Amino acid sequence: NEQFLADYRPYPFDLKQVALEFDLAPAATRVLAALDFQPRESGADLVLDGGKQIKLLSLTIDGAVPDAAHVSRDDETLTIAAAALPSGPFRLETEVQIDPSANTAFEGLYLSGGMFCTQCEAEGFRHITFYPDRPDVMTTFRVLVRSDQPVLLSNGNPVRQEPGLAEWHDPWPKPSYLFALVAGDLVAVSDHFTTRSGRDVALNVWVRPGDQDRAGFAMESLIKSMKWDEDAYGREYDLDVFNIVAVDDFNMGAMENKGLNIFNSKLVLASPDTATDADYERIESVIAHEYFHNWTGNRITCRDWFQLCLKEGLTVFRDQQFTADMRSAAVKRISDVQSLRARQFREDQGPLAHPPRPDHYEEINNFYTATVYEKGAEVIGMLKRLVGDDGYRKSLDLYFQRHDGDAATIEDWLQVFEDATGRDLTQFKRWYTDAGTPRLKMAEDWGDGRLTLRFTQNTPPTPGQPDKPARVIPISVGLIGPNGDEVLPSQILEMTEASQSFSFDGLGARPVVSALRGFSAPVILEREIDDATRAFLLAHDSDPFARWEAGRDLALSALLQLAQGNMAGDDYIAAIGQLIADENADPAFRALCLNLPSEEEIATRLSARGVVPDPDAIHAARTDLARRIAETHEALLSNLYRLMAVPGAYSPDADAAARRSLRIAVLGLLSRIDGGDRAEVLFGTAGNMTERMAALVCLIRRGRGQTALRLLEEEFGDNRLVMDKWFMIQPMVAPVAESVQIAQTLAKRKDFDWKNPNRFRALLGGLAANHAGFHRADGAGYAFTADWLMKMDRANPQIAARMSTAFETWTRYDAGRREKALAALQRMAAMEGISRNLREMVSRMIAAR
Ligand code: ARG
Ligand code: ZN
């Protein structure tokens, strides 16, 4: 069932317009569809997508029932033979019946807590009615909804609202994956926005009655996003209304349906006592992301799903720019790189590696990945670095002008840059088509006032791509003099060869090289550098990313030594002491420097160097280093802990959040030596979830979390979002020996509502995030996870497949662990009735054996 990019053919019919009528009922919803087709070529059969759970009640062409011999169905399509079709325009009308109440996959039309809602990307519309469910078939939709639910929403502008009935019309042609419908008992937080050209847009964030007081921040974020897109990209909104709906059962984060964004409730609802600073920041960025899709995704969509990164990479890039503008750009860049390494580098180094634009897949839902999203965004960042800010702006203007209304490709996207800037992007395109993370080696030659940097690039093989030609790599470099002054400000070296040198002349003394500033390319930089030079960069580098990276490398160098049984860490401990005492440095930046690399990151680095990671040794090394930092700097840290307390009422703004983030990082260290006393006080006194959660982590780690956990449960037992945190944190922070047992116990609770994606992700994701716990030597973590993935696969294949990535690193561990992980994977592969989603994932992982 593989799909190939090379097989793309345009759909042989144009779809002129669509009218839909829904009669909503939980177990028997009727859908009437009138599709006006116009053949583009003669003699083509009309093939419509439609799953076998759709009951076809009637079908007519221009009002007449076609000969039954000309209509056929299989599990995934309905075909009307060319012989039964007029040669000119015709109307196809179907009536079908579907059962939203039985839809546990949350794809298509389903129920969430009694409310009707939809998720159609990528291929959910085919579970609603028969349709050419592909992104290059675009048309205008008129939608009539009949239901006794009080609020009835769909895409576009409202045409008619009466008790029991609503009609919506979307004037902008769109593909079916952007269709949405919501019917439920909802209340709105409302506001409005006047666009630059004077259109007044009614804004609503729809939530369940009682949740209104937690929807204000989402609304503020929406208004900021609308303004920002006008200012930064000249993009205005194009309908009279913009609706956002929060739902509790949702497979992903959120969805950009035209004029009717649907969100996982955890990305809408926030109040100081229930949401952390990280939650607030994420809400702001996801609201922005979905809003920005209105231009990059909806007005310009994708020709086919291979082009997914055309909209996702660009929209992630835009939401990253937005957050950088709203908050600290340096801190945002560092956290984005951290998560790129944790998720995308991990993916790129294992059996699931694929290019930002894959050229084949079995199940497209398996490709909503860190590579398509985050690496897709990095590739655009590189493009911008290469063509400059003006070149980027010109190219984007041309993109919107040339492709508005199109279903476009990566080729179209690159062509725009070539035309706007005159640059040849043939070699650059490899970033889209080739998988894997390039290793970039840097060596230095010094003599006679001349510094030469010699770079060599090499990308290890990935599944299906044994050889990797050289890529264009923009390398941002600055030079720092021995006294700490910058002698050469940042400049971009453009590497295009497998090996290439760049020289700098007329230097008085040998400078220290600050390389890959701002993380100018998603590569792994390997350079000969000692800890003293790293400490020098941590003290003097003017580029915040490079400065943070120097501290990171120092910490990693110590941790890698410690994890292999050697003594290390004094240089890092000394250097970090200087940094935390630096009152001029942004508290959020200091917090980032203070947070030690995760155990997962240490394992990834070790295996990239050909060392088999030992999860228990890594855990011990990290624990030991944290304790030594605390012991050495106890006085400094205690002082900082008091200093960073944020007085007054909670506000989620960047400055207050920055202070809290430093305070929490400090608490994490101090709790290693104070037995958890400070954490206990903070848990009891803090009025906000950020500090309470941080305190709870420390308490659990110290083995004294029981009271706090009980208190939290008493206070928030009926708040799903808080309880998700409660379910996640326990297996995640638990001591290695207890984590699986704790997960097992939690899984037996009656509020472990496993069919709810957030709850399932909390528990299974929490365990998977416990590196040494999940990778327990006896395989108990693997077995527990496999059991639950198989159970989930019968209800919701998307979630099962996504969570199976817990296994994506299995090949890097020792033979004993590998054997147990492989057994778990094979057990899943052998499951009767396994979904296409999970089957594709486990077979790709098994193939790496
Ligand atoms: N387009 C959405 C976003 O990035 C993601 C929806 C993906 N849904 C899915 N079932 N694969 O915001
Ligand atoms: Zn997106």
Image (cartoon, rainbow, N blue to C red):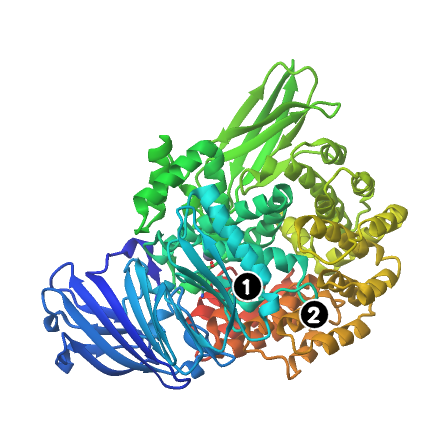
Q: Type of residue at label 1?
A: Thr
Tell whether 178 sits left or right of 569: left
Instruction: Please tell me which of labels 2 and 1 falls first in the chain.
Output: 2
Say which amino acid is labelled 2.
Pro
Question: Viewed as shown, does residue 99 lie left or right of 818?
Answer: left
- Whole-number angstrom distance, CA of label 2 to CA of label 1: 18 Å
Secondary structure category for the residue under label 1: helix
Q: Is residue 751 left or right of residue 110?
A: right
> Label for residue 546?
none
User: Looking at the picture, does residue 426 appear above or below residue 35?
Assistant: above
Residue that appears at 79% across and 71% down: 708
Give the quarter of the figure containing the N terminus: bottom left
Picture layout, residue 374 above or below residue 169: above
Label 1 crowd (10 A; few <14 / some 14-19 / many >=20): some
Identified at 43% across, 50% down, the residue is 195
Q: Which mark is on residue 731?
A: 2
- Would you identify the image quadrant in which residue 476 lies? top right
User: Within 8 Å: ligand 1 and the Cβ of disc 1?
Assistant: no
Q: Nearer the viewer, mark 2 or mark 1?
A: 2
On the image, the x and y values in percent for residue 612 come to 66, 54
Q: Read off the residue under disc 1.
A: 805
Where's residue 79, x and y in %? 21, 73
SS for callout 2: helix
